[in-house]
Amino acid sequence: MTTSQVITTAFLLISITLILFVSPSLFPNHHHPITSLFDFDDPEDLSLFRRASSPSSRKISHLSFPRPIPLPKVAFLFLTNSNLTFSPLWDRFFNSSPSPRLFNIYVHADPRCGFSDPLGHFHGRLIHSKPTERASPSLIAAARRLLATAILDDPFNFYFAVVSQHCIPLHSFDYMYGSLFGHPVSGPNPNPFRSNPLRDPSGFKSFIEVLSDEPNLHERYVARGDHVMLPEVPFNRFRVGSQFFILSKPHALTVIKDRKLWRKFRLPCLNNQLCYPEEHYFPTLLDMMDGDNCSGYTLTRVNWTGCYDGHPRVYQPEDVSADLVRSLRQSEGDFSYFFARKFAPDCLPLLMDLADDVIFRD
Ligand SMILES: *[C@@H]1O[C@H](CO)[C@@H](O)[C@H](O)[C@H]1NC(C)=O
Ligand SMILES: *[C@@H]1O[C@H](CO)[C@@H](O)[C@H](O)[C@H]1NC(C)=O
Ligand SMILES: *[C@@H]1O[C@H](CO)[C@@H](O)[C@H](O)[C@H]1NC(C)=O
């Protein structure tokens, strides 16, 4: 290229960039205040995802690890738009584990909710958070931010569990840890076939619901327009599932490295009644990229019986009992359910009464 060609090209690139960044603020979209934020990749998010997926943070270099390789940890990713009502119960859950501390806690709280932890129960880290809203891609963005922050924060995080302020634990930490990794928190690994996933992640699945037979699936597929998902997402690859999942580290990296599907799923819906981007993005992406290593079910119990408005059953104080906890645990998957939702905030005292004798007794 000649010098003048270089200058012309640079001028064009700068102009396009300016138009892209300035025009949305000149013409704000009053109908979709949050969705319009997703017309472009958020530069802060992009930089976070780049750092988290860069080879230096991604590669678990055997040389850089202390020997023997430490036990893997579980990162708890709390996605909330209110204070965490059940933090005393979660606190009990985390304290039910003997040392060493094999978990980390990260909180993404909508900044408009004035999140605080007045009792100081919760020793989680509040990450840099942005507004979230139903029927917008903001919940996908928040989960991606949580995953990236947790990957960067601690190389020993291996499983990443998304939970909300309405979730409660149904088992002790040790029970969950033993089920996920095939051996208890303390003591020798009794199962020599399950190695440390930090050394070899094969055989350690993600626990994410992946469904293709929902009655509304086609309406949800065309919620952004008839053909907009093509060619990246043909209808026969479009999936649905709960946003409350536990991802393995390889899958967490798949999510934060993805830009192709994110570009589609962040498009605004034309029909908000059928718009649940976070229930489609994660199952579709992971099923496409590595479906064989996904369980196809979630370990967070939710009761949809008799619900048609997009809101599941919310358990009230009069529902809370030892029998409820035991029945919520029952699953048809390989493991008992670890968590359940949704519980009304005033269930807390009753759940605390059940904590030691029922919930954390396995
Ligand atoms: C969270 O707790 C703080 C302090 O108690 C309170 O000021 C704030 O309003 C609470 N936020 C919500 C959404 O309840
Ligand atoms: C699943 O994980 C194993 C081990 O990590 C890997 O070899 C394989 O390529 C992954 N994908 C599929 C589809 O099996
Ligand atoms: C789920 O909700 C239905 C309807 O509200 C109720 O009859 C059923 O007992 C609930 N199941 C569990 C396990 O709580």
Image (tube, rainbow, N blue to C red):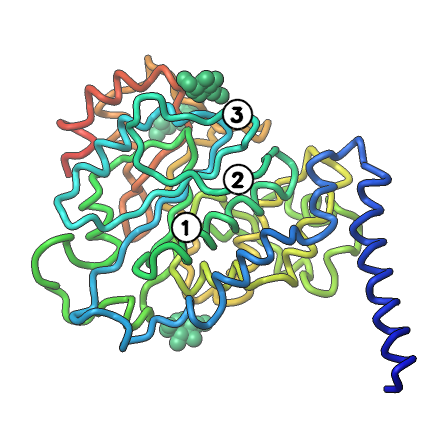
Q: Which residue is mark 2?
A: 129
Instruction: Name the quarter where the C terminus is drawn.
Output: top left
- The numbered mark, 2 or 3, whose residue comes first in the sequence reads 3
Q: Residues within 10 Å of mark 3 (few under 14, many from 20)?
A: few
- Whole-angstrom CA distance, mark 2 to mark 1, is 28 Å
The residue type indicated by label 3 comes to Cys
- In this view of the protein, which residue sits in the foreground, 239 or 104? 104
Q: Secondary structure at mark 3?
A: helix
Provide residue 78's location: percent of width, then percent of height: 41, 39
Provide residue 69's location: percent of width, then percent of height: 20, 68
Q: Residues within 10 Å of mark 2 (few under 14, many from 20)?
A: some
The residue type indicated by label 1 comes to Tyr
Q: 285 above or below 25? A: below
Q: Residues within 10 Å of mark 1 (few under 14, many from 20)?
A: some
- The numbered mark, 2 or 1, whose residue comes first in the sequence reads 2
Q: Which residue is depicted at the point 16% across and 42% down?
A: 97
- The numbered mark, 3 or 1, whose residue comes first in the sequence reads 3
- Whole-angstrom CA distance, mark 2 to mark 3, is 11 Å
Q: 134 above or below 44? A: above
The residue type indicated by label 2 comes to Ser
Q: Which residue is mark 1?
A: 297
Q: Which residue is mark 3?
A: 113
Quadrant for ligand 1 reads top left
Q: Which residue is depicted at the point 86% across and 60% down?
A: 15
